[in-house]
Amino acid sequence: MISIIVPVYNAEAFLKKCVESIQAQTFAEWELLLVDDGSTDGSGELCDELAATDTRIRVFHKQNGGVSSARNAGIEAAQGDGLMFVDADDSLSPELCSILAAHSAEAEIVISGYCDCSPAGEQDVIPQVEGVLDKAGLEACFEDLYTRNMLNAPWAKLYSREMVGDLRYDEGVALGEDFLFNLACLERAKRISVVRVAGYRYNRMNESAATRSFRESDLEQIVTLYTEGCAFIKKSGIPQKKESVLEERLCINGINLLQLLFYTKHPYTEKKRLAATLLERPEYAACCEKSYPFSMRYKIPQAFCRKKWYSGLAAFFAVKHTLQKCMKMLHIRKGT
C-alpha cells in the first residue's frame, strides 16, 4: 500500500482537485493522509468533508508548524510500505501511482518527471536517463536529476517506508529541507529507479505559494545547502566537477534572495549590511567568479555581486521591480 501524504495549509481553493486526482488513480492500494497544519481558511473543514466520502482518507489536525512538521506527522501515521508526498495545490495523472509502484520492488526510491504548470504554459520535465541505478549509476545522472529539480523536491517520487526508517524532515530549516531529506534518503538507498514519465502536475499558477517574503536566515541557509550538496558528492564518489551545478544554483539562489531583500522597505544601510553577509561569504564569492550560461537577468546582478557593488544591485532591482509592476498593469488593462 502507498501512503500519500498531503500537507494542507490554507489550500481551500486547490485541495478538492488534488484529492480527486488521487481518488482517480488506477492503482487502488493507497491511503491518503491529509495533514491540516493549522489552516485559517476553510481547508480543515474541507479535509473532514472529503474524508467523510472515502474511507481511504484520514485527516489529522495540528497546530501550525510548517510543511516539514506536517510531512513528519504524515510519516508517523503512515501505514503503507511506500510513501508519496503531494502538495495540496498540485495533482496527479491517473496512472502515476501504478507506474511508480511497478518499479518499487527493484529500488528503494522511484523518481519520475513532472509537468511544470506555470503562467507561461505547461512543460513536461523528464529525466534523460531511465532504469535502475546503483551508486555508480547515480554518479552518472546526478547533474541531470539535480538541474531538472528532481533531487530538490519530495514530490513525483515513491520512497520505501523501510528505507526512510527514522529519517524525518528538519523542522528547523525553512528553505531547502526537501533537498536535505532527499540527500539523506539517497545515502541510504542502494538502488534508485528513474522513470521517464511526467505524471505529477506541479502547479506554479498559485501566486500565493510562489511568493515569499525575505528571511534573513535564508542567506545562511543557501550556503548550507551548497556545502551539504558538495559533501554528498564527495561521500558518494561523484566526480567533483559535478559541483559546478551546485555552484550555479547557489549563485542564482543568492541573486533571488538579494532581489527579495532589496524589495523590502528596510533602510538602504540595512539592506547593504544584510547583503554583505552573503557577498562576503567565501563560498558565495567563489561561485560568483565562475562563468554560467545566464541571461542578462542574472548575468548583470552576478557582475554586481562579484564587485560587491551594492548601489548597482539596488538600482538594478529597483528598475526590475518598476518594470514588473508596469507589465502587470498592462496585463490587467489588456484583460479588461
Image: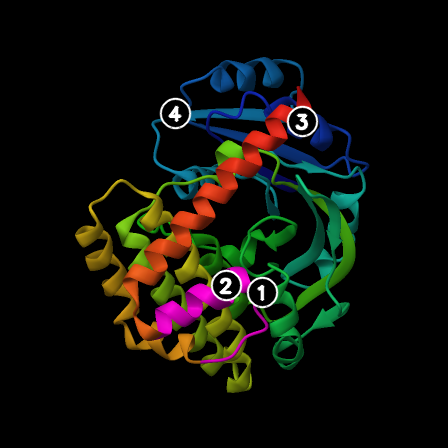
- Placement of 28 over or under 123, stated as above or below: above
Q: Nearer the viewer, mark 3 or mark 4?
A: 3
Quadrant location of the N terminus? Answer: top right
Quadrant for residue 121, please give it: top right
Q: Quadrant of residue 33?
A: top right
Label 2 crowd bin: few (<14), some (14–19), many (20+), radius 10 Å: some
Where is residue 213 shown, x and y percent of the image?
36, 41
What's the amino acid at mark 4?
Gly
How far apart, in angstroms, are the residues tagged by discs 2 and 4?
A: 37 Å
For marks 1 and 3, the one nearer the N-term is 1
Q: According to the image, label 3 marks what residue?
A: 334
Is 49 in front, or is 67? Answer: 67
- In the picture of the structure, the residue carrying the numbered disc 1 is 295
Asked which secondary structure carries label 1, the reply is loop
Q: Position of residue 158 (x, y in %)?
A: 64, 52
For label 4, the crowd category at 10 Å Cα-Cα, with few meaning under 14, some 14 to 19 and many 20 or more, is: some
Q: Is residue 16 at all visible to an observer of this figure? A: yes
The CA span between labels 3 and 4 is: 38 Å
| Residue 301 forms part of the magenta stretch | yes
Mark 4–mark 1 distance (CA, rounded to whole Å): 40 Å
Say which label, 2 or 4, has the lower sequence index: 4
Label disc, if present, on residue 317 of the rendered structure: none
Location of residue 2 in the rendering, given as x and y in whole percent from the top left corner: 65, 42
Looking at the image, which is closer to me, 25 or 226? 226
Of 193 and 175, nearer the camera is 175
